[in-house]
């Protein structure tokens, strides 16, 4: 049984239930110094006081905004940062993000309603103009035709079409959030000087591959082929480099070095 102390300090299990994160997550945050409980019970259990819980809530806010844990820790521990002013700025950003997501969710609902349910050869029946409105001002109407011409006969295309048709608005939002968080973590890793081929970089490469696997089963070799487009296609390069200067080239190297570590030669990798 969990020991109690008769005052306001809470054990890790009770805090996990209160804030909606796992005990394992709280242990991890303790281990990296992000949120360390203020005390211990006589039997050795971690005890969190009101200040500790307030810090946890701030971590959750910043994490929701896509900040990496290391960046969150620096913000919380920087004596030069006014917590209230910083949170007000982040709240404004969060409200803007909510508005964008609500607009995207509405557009996705429309896209789902109009998706062609009778064929594996296309993923949407939207016109190019409607796709541009849904996916943003940088959407090129030629993207879908290019993709169909290049990949239309592959199993990956058929998988992607099938999985797209089955998704609801909430699933599309989850995918968008996942990609935003991944790209934020990629940019943060580049800023920290993470070297391609290292443990952290390889973990990010696998997260990137898992995000692709939301749409179709992606092998290491296929991921390498995609990675090449991040520097060879100016549209992909602009997308990633808008996040962080040099991110496109760095991500390509991260993908290639991870593939090499698993026995795939990036120089000879093909889609099949």
Image (tube, rainbow, N blue to C red):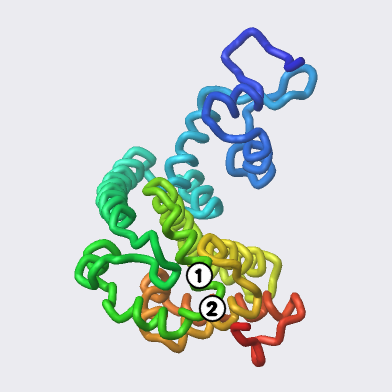
Could you tell me how far apart the alpha carbons at marks 2 and 1 are, in whole angstroms? 7 Å
Please state if 118 lies on the left or on the right of 198 as rendered.
left
Q: Quadrant of residue 208?
A: bottom right
Q: Which residue is mark 1?
A: 158
Q: Residue 244: x percent and y percent? A: 42, 72
Most extreme residue toward the bottom is: 268
Which residue is found at the position 30% from the left and 53% from the top?
113
Q: Residue 241 — which label?
A: none
Q: Residue 55: x percent and y percent? A: 50, 35
Which residue is found at the position 53% from the left and 60% from the top?
214
Please state if 203 lies on the left or on the right of 88 as rendered.
right
Q: Residue 260: x percent and y percent? A: 71, 81
Q: Residue 154 — which label?
A: 2
Please state if 41 lies on the left or on the right of 150 as rendered.
right
How crowded is the residue under tag 2: few (<14 C-alpha within 10 Å), some, or many (20+)? Answer: few
Q: Disc 2, disc 1: CB below 8 Å?
A: yes
Which residue is found at the position 48% from the left and 44% from the top?
76
Q: Quadrant of the N terminus?
A: top right
Which residue is found at the position 49% from the left and 41% from the top?
59
* Residue 89 appears in the picture as rendered: no
Say what secondary structure mark 1 lies in: helix
Say what secondary structure mark 2 lies in: loop
Most extreme residue toward the left is: 129
Q: Residue 137: x percent and y percent? A: 23, 70
Most extreme residue toward the front is: 118
Most extreme residue toward the right is: 43
């Amino acid at each position: 049984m969990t020991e109690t102390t008769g005052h306001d300090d809470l054990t890790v299990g009770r805090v996990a239930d209160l804030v909606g994160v796992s005990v394992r997550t709280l242990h991890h945050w303790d281990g990296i110094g992000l949120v360390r409980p203020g005390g211990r019970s006589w039997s050795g259990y971690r005890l969190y006081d009101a200040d500790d819980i307030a810090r946890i809530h701030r971590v959750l806010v910043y994490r929701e905004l896509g900040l990496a844990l290391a960046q969150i820790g620096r913000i919380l521990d920087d004596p030069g940062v006014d917590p209230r002013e910083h949170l007000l700025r982040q709240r404004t950003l969060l409200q803007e993000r909510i508005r964008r997501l609500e607009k995207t969710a509405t557009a996705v609902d429309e896209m789902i309603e109009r998706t062609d349910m009778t064929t594996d050869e296309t993923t949407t029946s939207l016109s190019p103009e409607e796709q541009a409105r849904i996916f943003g001002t940088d959407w090129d109407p030629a993207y879908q035709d290019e993709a169909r011409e290049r990949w239309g006969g592959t199993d990956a295309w058929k998988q992607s079409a099938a999985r797209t048709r089955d998704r609801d608005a909430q699933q599309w939002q989850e995918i968008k959030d996942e990609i935003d968080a991944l790209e934020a973590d990629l940019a943060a890793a580049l800023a920290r000087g993470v070297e391609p081929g290292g443990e952290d970089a390889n973990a990010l490469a696998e997260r990137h591959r898992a995000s692709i696997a939301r749409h179709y089963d992606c092998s290491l070799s296929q991921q390498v082929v995609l990675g090449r487009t991040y520097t060879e296609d100016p549209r992909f390069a602009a997308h990633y480099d808008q996040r962080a200067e040099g991110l496109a080239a760095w991500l390509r190297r991260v993908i290639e070095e991870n593939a090499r570590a698993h026995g795939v030669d990036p120089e000879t990798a093909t889609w099949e």
